[in-house]
Image: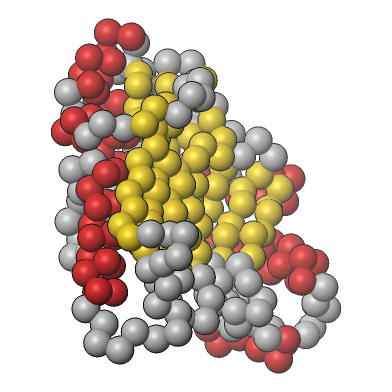
Amino acid sequence: MKKHAPIVLLLFLGLPWAAARAQQAPLPPFRTGPLRLEKVSFSKTKGNCNDGPCVTASIDYLKVVSAENAQAGARLTAAIANWVLRLPGGRVAKNPQEVIDEFVDSTWETRQGEAKPGPSFSRPLIETITLEVEYQSPRALSLSLFVGSYTGGAHPNEWLTYANFRPATGERIHLTDIFKQGFTVPLNAVGERRFRELKGLGPQESLKNTRFRFPNDQFQLNDNFAINTYGLVFYFQDYEIGPHAEGPTKLFLPYKDIRDLLRPDADIP
């Protein structure tokens, strides 16, 4: 999913979300070959966050500046928007600012309508969205999406998800695109060994009895993974496989452990 040559920049400047005036971050574009991604930032606040109540939100987004060709750039631009700019109900926002507006306006309206404000009424309600490049090469692009929010309650919440793409085409990379048929069982075996090492668990200890929750007490990787130079990173969200006290889990599988499971045409990293 590489980006266009400089002439293709004109294609992206005409995209709907470009109409929203972004605060251009003073950072150089990420670039490997023709693919160039530029960080742009948006924010909005209602209320007074010094003495509350207030609602505030921000988003750091990645704009496709150029790619291998127009088709790859347009496909990658659409894929990022469909992933990051989802609104309640499943609609895709026209631009990042609309995502921020939706959160701030709806949350502020709800807060103002509270009949009996509680003791946390003056606490700022916050949402932060950050899209970043985790890894980039001519063969693979890995992006991470972090969402942190506090909308009341005992503690803030956060989520981290990954998405991987082919720079030359803009197509998404899934586990089935890089692993041989029948990879699930042996890959989970590698993942479980690394997981037990990470958590200090013995090879025969029950996962269920050691605070972790997997279907039928059997370790299972999810599909939330990132590609990098040295291997694959899998991420389990807070509460996904254990209690909040355990927190999220980032699990690294080096290529030396999974090389035999990769397809000949996996073409990573």
- Asked whether residue 196 is in view, the answer is yes
Q: What residue is rendered at 55% in x and 71% in y?
A: 238
List the single residue furthest toward the top. Answer: 7
Q: Above or below — where is 4 with respect to 168?
A: above
- Asked whether residue 84 is in view, the answer is no
Of residues 252 and 218, the one nearer the viewer is: 252
Q: What residue is rendered at 43% in x and 59% in y?
A: 49
List the single residue furthest toward the front. Answer: 51
Q: What residue is rendered at 65% in x and 35% in y?
A: 229
In which image quadrant can residue 245 be found? Answer: bottom right
Of residues 224 and 175, the one nearer the viewer is: 224
Q: How are the residues colored?
A: secondary structure
Q: Above or below — where is 219 with respect to 72?
A: below
Left or right of residue 141, residue 202 in this image = right
Left or right of residue 266, residue 98 in this image = left
Left or right of residue 10, residue 30 in this image = right
Q: x, y (%) of residue 124?
A: 43, 66
Of residues 127 and 55, the one nearer the viewer is: 55
Work out which quarter of the rendered image holds the N terminus and state it.
top left
Left or right of residue 95, residue 53 in this image = right
Q: What residue is rendered at 22% in x and 48% in y?
A: 98
Q: Above or below — where is 186 with respect to 244?
A: above
Q: x, y (%) of residue 220?
A: 57, 71
Of residues 84 and 212, the one nearer the viewer is: 84
Work out which quarter of the rendered image holds the C terminus and state it.
top right
